Each structure stands twice: as C-alpha cells, then as structure tokens.
Amino acid sequence: MQSIPISMAQTLQQHILSGHYPGGSQLPPQRELARQLGISRASLREALSMLEALGLVEIQPGKGVRINGPHSGRARMHRAYATPALGTLSPRQLIELRLVLEPGWAALAAVRADDSGLRQLQWTQSQLAHALDRSDLLAAADADLQFHLLLAQLSGNPGLVAMARQLELAISHSLRLPFAWSGADDQPVREHDAIVQAVCAGDAPGAAGAMRAHLLSAARRSGIDLDTPEPDATAHDTTAPDTPAPEPDPLSFRLTPPSEGAFA
C-alpha cells in the first residue's frame, strides 16, 4: 500500500502533467492545499519534496511553490547533491561513481543470480515499463531504483550490497534527473531490457557493457555529456586535430560463480 505522501505526489503530478497547474503558475498556499487534499501539512511537504526532486516544482521559501512543468531547466539539473556519507557531489560526479560500481555488480549478477532472482529482476523491469506507460514519473523512478539495487543484491557480494544501501539516496537522486529532464521516455525500458537479457543469459561482459551504455545514456538525458572532456582536459594534447580520441575499453570480466554457501 502506498504512503499518503507518495499518493498525493502522484495526484499532484497528474494535475501538473495534464496542465491543470500550468508551468509558471503557483500552487495554492500549503495550508489551503493540504485542506483541499485532506492531508496533513507534513505529508504535503513530503509530497512536494518528491515533486521537487523530479523537477516538476520549485519550493521557494517565503514565496510558495512554483510549477516548472514536465521539463525543468538545465541549471536546476546540475545542482550539487549533498549526501551524509559522501559529501557534496555534482550530478556528473554521481554518474561517474555509478559507472565505477554498477557495471561490476551487473556482471556479477549475470553469473550468480538464481532463477528466483532473475524472475524478480524481470518483474521489477515490468513495473518500470508499466509506470512509464502511465506517465507516472514517481513510480517509474522508484521502479528504476529498485532495479539497480536488486542487481547489486544479485551480485552475491555482501560488500557491494552494503555499498548500494549506503548510496541508495544518492543513486535515487541520480535516477530522477533523466525523468525530470525527458519525462516519460521509454528509452530506459529498452536499455534495461538489454541488461536483463544479458544477465539472464549469464553474459557478464554483456551485462557490464549494457549497464555502462545505460548510465551514459541516462547522463545524456540529464543534460550531462560524459563523452565531452573537461574544458582544460586537452590543453596539452599533442594529438593531431583530425585524429579521433580512442574509445575507452570496456571493463573485462572473467568471473566464476562463488563456491556453494560463500554468500549464505
């Protein structure tokens, strides 16, 4: 059963995406809106925080809540995110962190997930597809998060599982950015399908490559181009201008399933 804040956030999301609350307008004062919705102001604040994370609204202290519409501006997309464990990270740094970790645990999941785990992965993927079909960005972001965390669990490595749990809020924030920027795009479903197919086939390099491609695509959907170097990264580059930069080699995984009971 959904919590009241999630249910209210989905209701408000539908009003925003339908144009009932047009972009640039202000929501009613929170006291009045909470009364209209029949919920506490605390639940309303939590719901509004979820919508702000998706870029649909902007909470302006002393001014109210402004509707951004289904696509928020690039400036907001690139604000830094503060985490208790990691300090303050930019959206680019969050993606870089995930690029280091997630292809590895996807590869491990490909060789270690059992039939039950694979069925759960396929079911979680179906929830993402259904949420995007309904243009329910909140449910889509949650299903997306559960998909990525489940792959860490299926890696069979307790250290990676613990890291995923520690990074859950940061990963959740990173996952919301593409939905905030591009809306209910079905591209994430196709990218997840490639990951699921590789994991179910036991193809560790394929799973790692599909995850890496997905993260790079998600970065682009967030307005972050990781293929573009930092402004001064090539200041001393002597490579001829017409010589294309080499593509980074994909991570190579040669994995064997753990011995029985190793992760019991």
Image (cartoon, grey):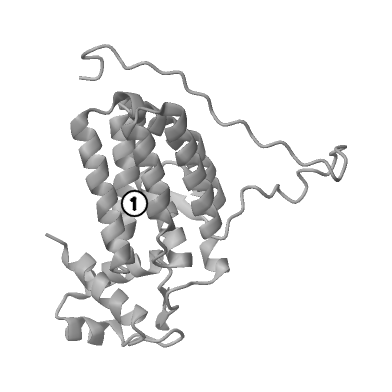
Quarter of the image for residue 236 reads top right
Q: Which residue: 36% across, 49% down?
A: 169
Which of 124 and 67 lies nearest the eye of the viewer?
124
In the picture, which quadrant includes the N terminus?
bottom left
Q: Is residue 90 at least partly visible in the picture?
A: no
Quarter of the image for residue 187 reads bottom left
In the picture, which quadrant includes the C terminus?
top left
Which residue is tagged 1?
A: 144
Which of 114 and 8 lies nearest the eye of the viewer?
114
| Helix, strand or loop at mark 1 | helix
Q: Which residue: 85% across, 45% down?
A: 242
In the rendered image, residue 252, in percent from the top left (x then y), is placed at 52, 24
In the rendered image, residue 23, in percent from the top left (x then y), is placed at 44, 84
Please say if 137 is above or below 14.
Answer: above
Amino acid type, mark 1: Asp
117 relative to 253 in the view: left or right: left
In the rendered image, residue 43, in percent from the top left (x then y), is placed at 21, 70
Q: Is residue 134 at least partly visible in the picture?
A: yes
Please say if 67 is above or below 88.
Answer: below
In the rendered image, residue 52, in percent from the top left (x then y), is placed at 39, 69
